Amino acid sequence: MRAHQSGRLDEAAAHYRRFLGLQPGHVGALSNLGLLLAETGARAEAETLLRDALARDPAALTAHVNLALVLHDEGRFDAAIAACLEGLRLSPGHRKLSNLLASSYRGAKRYEEGAALLRQMVAAHPGYAEGQRMLAAMCLQLGLVDEAAQAFAKAAKADPRDIESLVSAGDAMLVLGRAKEALAQLDRALKLKPYDVKALSLKLLALADLGRRDEERWLGDPDRLVHRMRITELGYAADDIPALNRRLSEWASADPSMREDPPEYATAKGWHSTTNLAESDFPAVAELKTLIMAAYRRRLERLAEEDPAHPFVKNAPRDVHIDMWAVKMQESGKMLPHIHASGWLSGVYYVDVPSVVNDPAGGEAGWIKFGPPRLDVKLRHETLQRTLKPEPGLMVTFPSYLWHDTVPLPPENREQRLCLAYDLHPVS
């Protein structure tokens, strides 16, 4: 057991097997070896050993806990729920089994049962921050936004350094139209982490709702903070842009990670790559990455134009790494309002641009728009907004917390709109 607890798994496994050779069927050794095998990926053998242990001693609580853990980690949530309930019959209120049961209810999307359990748990332990967080998440799935906001706030009260709960409480309160309360929670989070992208993005919406236009403009004015430049301004020859874009288009359009409307992204009726394209060794990507880094240095130089107290300035990273993806759209394609939650600076480079974007009667179809709020947040005052027309060879950069979407392409559009978007993540 000491070898197991200190991470010497091969040594521990040998000891357990040697012990079982001396005392075959020893329930404690079967249970511990089962857990160890699960940790090394041998889950089928682990489950066999644990069920053997329980067949020998149905009252072996540790074996119930270990079996529930193995099943949960395999994503077999209904089976994990059954294992948890068996263990809880032996030990009602067992903390670890109760937590596993709540998490398994969430994994199985059995939100009503999960919320009911968690309400009991937090009533018995009001300072249980993780329980409040899980309850809030369940409530959001059930559409109980008010209860979710209260649970997130209680989690943050129980753990004052819990940034995620503070931000989530602010988020839920914004959805409920309680911008003043939301702002208080978001400001608490930003004292702990001054460049929390989600907190800054939600603060922009709260300020807009409250009509505090000067503060909104200072924090997120798209006219000031969204920069556009053609790559010729970064030293790239104009005559070489068509060839660069042709190579990028052929390569990105055929990327095997492309998915239609993947749910984790903001595409609607479009295709989105799902791996980091910046890791490719394709030569045209290397050229584009050089241009992205040149644009990054240009932004660093222009920080002197901003208030030194601005969070975008104060949290400028000395070094970054690039996360890049492709988005292609045609008929009715668009991006929903979103932010880039883990970047400092984000950008987009336009490769293929349909002719409709240049049509004066096209209603700015295919243009990128900065400032529109998330669809489930209804504001009393409109946010500061700006639209920009895509052009082949154009690069647009902006702080990652600025909301943005695109004007939908018309249903009859058959030309491809393809861009390569990216985040610059701070390297600590």
Image (tube, rainbow, N blue to C red):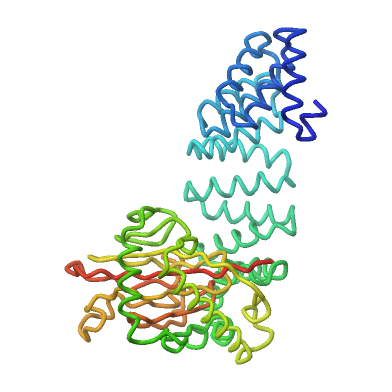
Image position, residue 105 (x, y; %): 54, 35
Q: Quadrant of residue 188?
A: bottom right
Viewport quadrant of the C terminus: bottom right
Q: Nearer the viewer, residue 243 or 128?
A: 243
Left or right: where 418 falls relative to 19: left
Left or right: where 107 falls relative to 242: right
Q: Nearer the viewer, residue 5 or 77?
A: 5
Q: Nearer the viewer, residue 247 or 378?
A: 247
Viewport quadrant of the N terminus: top right
Left or right: where 163 falls relative to 230: right
| Residue furthest out toward the bottom | 305
Image position, residue 204 (x, y; %): 54, 75
Q: Quadrant of residue 27?
A: top right
Image position, residue 343 (x, y; %): 56, 68
**Residue shown at 22% from the left, 65% from the top:** 331
**Residue shown at 20% from the left, 67% from the top:** 411
**Residue shown at 56% from the left, 83% from the top:** 212
Looking at the image, residue 319 lies above or below residue 269: below
Looking at the image, residue 111 lies above or below residue 144: above
Image position, residue 276 (x, y; %): 48, 59
| Residue furthest out toward the left | 412
Looking at the image, residue 169 lies above or below residue 139: below
Q: Quadrant of residue 370?
A: bottom left
**Residue shown at 51% from the left, 81% from the top:** 295
Count of numbered tags: 0
Looking at the image, residue 118 lies above or below residue 168: above
